[in-house]
């Protein structure tokens, strides 16, 4: 049987990457990256407003053509590959990244009349200009539709769909008036490839709809017009021009349109998979499944898990998203996350210690020589608030245990440990509510490059930490989705599980917990939880601050006196 | 009337400094510094034991001759000065710095048989080898003689007299056996100048005896033999070879011996003032008196105040020393302190940020542009424990409020503020127990060089911060003591107050509190006290950690929104 291939396209914050993947074994035959030319590394900024982050939709289209063409050209240098054997295309993107479109489903920003208007561009996920609107939505939903909040962890975010569209209405009503509809980037790119010409024909993914737009079949789709009219009559009026139904992965978003088939040299009509968020397709590409938690560790962390929809999943307090079918069909997609992980380390190394990559390596090496508890330090990882399990952006960092001899490497290690404690708190919360976590798979630059980080996580969480086999898990996951959507008859797969077993893999390196380190970290985690619960406002918090510094010093003294081997690698 | 002069000699940790001072106006006519040649900058260290710090007594004698000779030679270049008009000599030293002496009152270490024996040297104030002995003394006193502890804040220190002598007995019993007696450096140097030949003839100062050796007239001098025998029979046996009585400043320690008069070219028989600790004579040189608190700010801080003995002073919880006559006769000398002030800033700038003097200046300049509350940070100043008012070395630092944008200058400012909050806690405790603090005078390198530091202290404490007129307040204070001890008939003074009014001064620069900054700092101090009391184990602590980060963010937001002028200079 000759091989089939799918293409995965990953729209990141600064660039778009396309990969050509073998359906047989997940091998990447060709890859190509296109850096967005507009703005600052692809992001449009506004002087004086650090919260604004937009993108030029023209970059998306140029990136689509260029990256896929590049990946295919590279694949053609591999013996046996043929463009005819590409059976589907999958797309993942950042999100919530909504953009206003016209009646022909074209981005408003491509119209010369709106080209230079910031509000007419794509509103990048990390745009935080709509903080006030987000707070109002949370308030109004809490009073009038608490069910909307339950599934998203209790707080509507300024990064999400309705906050952004409402803010657009408040600051640029002309843009809102000119837009026929709005679309998530994750739905827009598949619609482009499928040649969709009308907003109502765009096939929307449940991933964006459920996690960002308060969509649920439980209340008939998007929030009701009655609810939206409490925000603004104009948002209520927009609702019918959006969508009634959203679909999980596996449902086709369309079929490759003739003009794109010609442009890319692919067969017309091959399947276009549902779009999805980078984290979710990253989880698919890293082997997410029942009992497997995938941690995508970057500047922040996104944790993805799934639970069989047949079992039902309770609302889990502090877990920001539980959406049926958002990651794979037949499962609740469960999304949690830490607001800052790599960013906390970056803050310490770059902003405080004024170093770069070399200093990251130096501090990692020095920190690896320390034993757990040896520094006497303990930190809270809240420099950017706490997304899960406290869902509170108005929390800040804390460091305790400093002496006059505390080194920068000790603080660096304490900050890694703090993020690991935060990760453990998420896992414990999931288990508490019946979500199995038997296996933890990490992906992202930090897990791939920083062995100390992985070892500390293994020791703190008390479980082996696995590393995804591919460094391109989102694009790989999109390619898996395309293979499943294409189906076995086309050379793809009949099931997600089957596709993942063949197309995804684990790296050989794995990090097992050391029993001695784990024991010390159990003690430190208990102290972390004291601080976490007390400063995080957990009602049942039971802190004993009067003895806390002494307990840390006691652990330090015991560890220094003992001969415990260094836990770092 | 022609002028009279006195000499002040200041034995510091790394050097000895002599100054020749005019009794008329306190002008320094000549000064000379001698760096101790032995060890590491004058300190004998032991490889592998970071707690050990000793000094070679030979350095003291060479330094005495060299520094005084140098100061006199410099003074002779000033018109009108004559050695004949020197009417007295005063000495201040570090302490508790005890040294073992032989039957001729000579340091054991000067004997070739003991020269290379570390235990036979002077045990420098910062020698911490006797931590276990100190803890045992505290335990035994708490059980059998709690009155001994009440006057010294409740905890006997490893830096003090009995801990060190007991530790010597434990590690080098041969040294203890060989020693006829022990003497504080503050008493040894005056005895040398006075030609004292027998240990029992050494005139001991109440300053060292009361603050470091648990001496009080209330229980007949040093701790009882019964008490000492609970430590060791050998310490009980030592007691009669020490002293029965100690004296306040103003009482002569002796008169200049013929050989030293010849060596220095001074008149034989001029008065030698009582020795005293550098902090206490520094306070005298900075104008300490009823209602005036003197803060000697260096790596750590020593706060000195006096209260009329006629009024009586209650034991003040957490104040480490209240001793009748230890600073000036007729007053209780009250000593408090912060375990780390300059050291906390040095830790941040040098250990963490890896800078030197230039970075101290850069961070000060950047921090001066910040407004109180603007960073959202709050710190506890406990990187070296808390001496006053918690008297707990087993406390550590804490920093809260960090975001991903927190700068090193913001942390630098937060650390200065933390030490200022600690200073305010001391002042409030003094006032609570009836000790007036109407005026605060600072001396030391940081107050002289760092205007931001002084401004923050003024704003936090809510009072003008004055700066002592002389950068050499300990030596000046010793010279004042010599002038008073010499008396008015000899060209000196009949009263301490009179001598201080003429011989000490304030710098022109003074730092007044800004009302707006003060208001913000009142809020921040309240939050500091929440953390301080909770983590410090204060029984009545009432912290609300759940809202603490939000309150800091609230202040930050208000300050950033408001137009309050920068409080920095």
Image (cartoon, coloured by chain):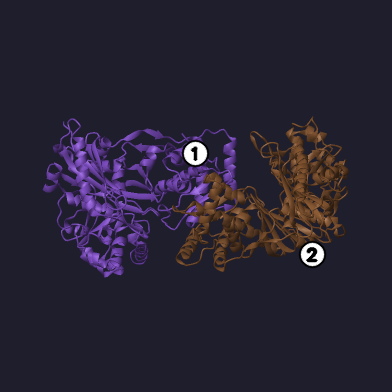
Chain colours: A brown, B purple
Left or right: where does residue A419 sit relative to residue A144? left
- List x then y, in percent, for residue B491: 17, 37
Indicate the chain on which mark 2 is placed: A
Residue A320: where, in percent of width, then height?
71, 53
Residue A219 coordinates in the image, percent (x, y): 83, 52
- For label 2, count other residues whose C-alpha is less than 10 Å away and answer few (under 14), some (14-19) or many (20+): few
Image side of residue A39 versus residue A244, left or right: left
The residue singled out by tag 1 in the image is B367
On-image quarter of the N terminus of chain A:
bottom right
Q: Secondary structure at mark 2?
A: helix
* Pointer 2 with pointer 1, Cβ within 8 A: no
Q: B498 or A561: which is nearer to us?
A: A561
| Residue at which label 2 appears | A311
Q: For this rendering, which residue is in front, A315 or A496?
A: A496
Image spot of residue A343 (x, y percent): 61, 48
- In the image, B118: left or right of A449? left
Which chain is disc 1 placed on? Answer: B
- For the question of whether residue B81 can be seen, the reply is yes
- In the displayed structure, does residue B471 sit left or right of residue A436? left
- Position of the C terminus of chain A, as image quadrant, is bottom right
Badge 2 and badge 1 in a common chain: no
A388 w.r.t. B68: above or below = below
Mark 1: few/some/many CA within 10 Å (<14, 14-19, 20+): many
Instruction: Give the CA distance from mark 2 to mark 1.
Output: 57 Å
Q: Which mark is residue B8?
A: none
- The reply to whether residue A158 is in sight is no
Residue at the spot 50% in from the left edge and 41% down from the top edge: B409
Please tell me which residue is depicted at 16% across the width and 45% down the height of the picture. B271
């Amino acid at each position: 049987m000759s091989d089939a291939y799918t293409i995965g396209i990953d729209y990141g914050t600064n660039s778009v990457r396309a990969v050509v993947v073998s359906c047989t074994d997940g091998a990447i035959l060709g890859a190509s990256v296109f850096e967005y030319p507009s703005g600052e590394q692809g992001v449009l900024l506004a002087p004086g407003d650090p919260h604004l982050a937009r993108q030029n939709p023209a970059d998306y289209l140029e990136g689509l053509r260029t990256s896929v063409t590049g990946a295919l050209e590279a694949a053609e240098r591999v013996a046996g590959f043929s463009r005819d054997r590409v059976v589907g295309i999958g797309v993942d993107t950042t999100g919530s990244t909504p953009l206003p479109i016209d009646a022909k489903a074209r981005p408003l920003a491509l119209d010369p009349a709106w080209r230079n208007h910031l509000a007419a561009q794509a509103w990048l996920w990390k745009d935080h200009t709509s903080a006030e609107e987000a707070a109002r939505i949370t308030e109004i939903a809490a009073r009038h539709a608490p069910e909307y909040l339950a599934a998203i962890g209790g707080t509507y975010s300024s990064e999400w769909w309705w906050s952004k569209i409402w803010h657009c209405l408040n600051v640029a009503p002309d843009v809102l008036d000119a837009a026929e509809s709005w679309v998530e980037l994750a739905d827009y790119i598949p619609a482009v490839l499928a040649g969709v010409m009308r907003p109502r024909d765009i096939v929307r993914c449940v991933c964006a709809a459920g996690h960002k737009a308060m969509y649920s079949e439980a209340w008939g789709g998007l929030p009701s017009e009655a609810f939206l009219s409490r925000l603004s009559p104009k948002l209520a009026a927009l609702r019918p021009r959006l969508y009634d139904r959203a679909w999980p992965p596996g449902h086709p978003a369309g079929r490759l349109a003739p003009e794109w088939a010609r442009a890319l040299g692919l067969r017309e009509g091959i399947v276009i998979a549902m779009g999805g968020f980078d984290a979710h397709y990253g989880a698919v590409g890293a082997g997410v499944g029942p009992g497997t938690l995938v941690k995508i560790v970057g500047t922040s962390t996104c944790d993805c898990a799934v639970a069989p929809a047949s079992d039902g999943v309770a609302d889990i307090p502090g877990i920001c998203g539980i959406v049926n079918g958002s990651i794979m069909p037949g499962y609740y997609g469960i999304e949690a996350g830490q607001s800052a992980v790599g960013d906390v380390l970056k803050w310490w190394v770059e902003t405080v210690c004024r170093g770069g990559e070399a200093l990251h390596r130096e501090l990692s090496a020095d920190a690896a020589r320390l034993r757990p508890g040896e520094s006497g330090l303990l930190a809270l990882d809240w420099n950017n608030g706490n997304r899960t399990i406290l869902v509170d952006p108005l929390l800040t960092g804390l460091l305790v245990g400093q002496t006059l001899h505390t080194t920068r490497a000790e603080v660096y290690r304490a900050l890694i440990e703090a993020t690991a404690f935060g990760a453990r708190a998420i896992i414990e919360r999931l288990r508490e509510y019946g979500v199995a976590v038997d296996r933890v798979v990490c992906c992202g630059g930090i897990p791939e490059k920083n062995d100390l980080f992985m070892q500390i996580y293994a020791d703190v969480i008390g479980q082996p930490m696995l590393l995804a086999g591919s460094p391109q898990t989102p694009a790989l996951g999109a390619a898996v989705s395309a293979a499943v959507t294409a189906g076995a008859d086309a050379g793809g797969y009949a099931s997600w599980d089957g596709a993942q077993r063949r197309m995804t893999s684990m790296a050989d390196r794995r990090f097992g917990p050391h029993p001695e380190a784990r024991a010390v970290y159990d003690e430190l985690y208990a102290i972390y939880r004291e601080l976490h619960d007390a400063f995080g406002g957990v009602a049942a918090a039971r802190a004993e601050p009067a003895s806390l510094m002494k307990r840390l010093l006691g652990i330090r003294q015991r560890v220094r006196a003992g001969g415990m081997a260094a836990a770092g690698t």
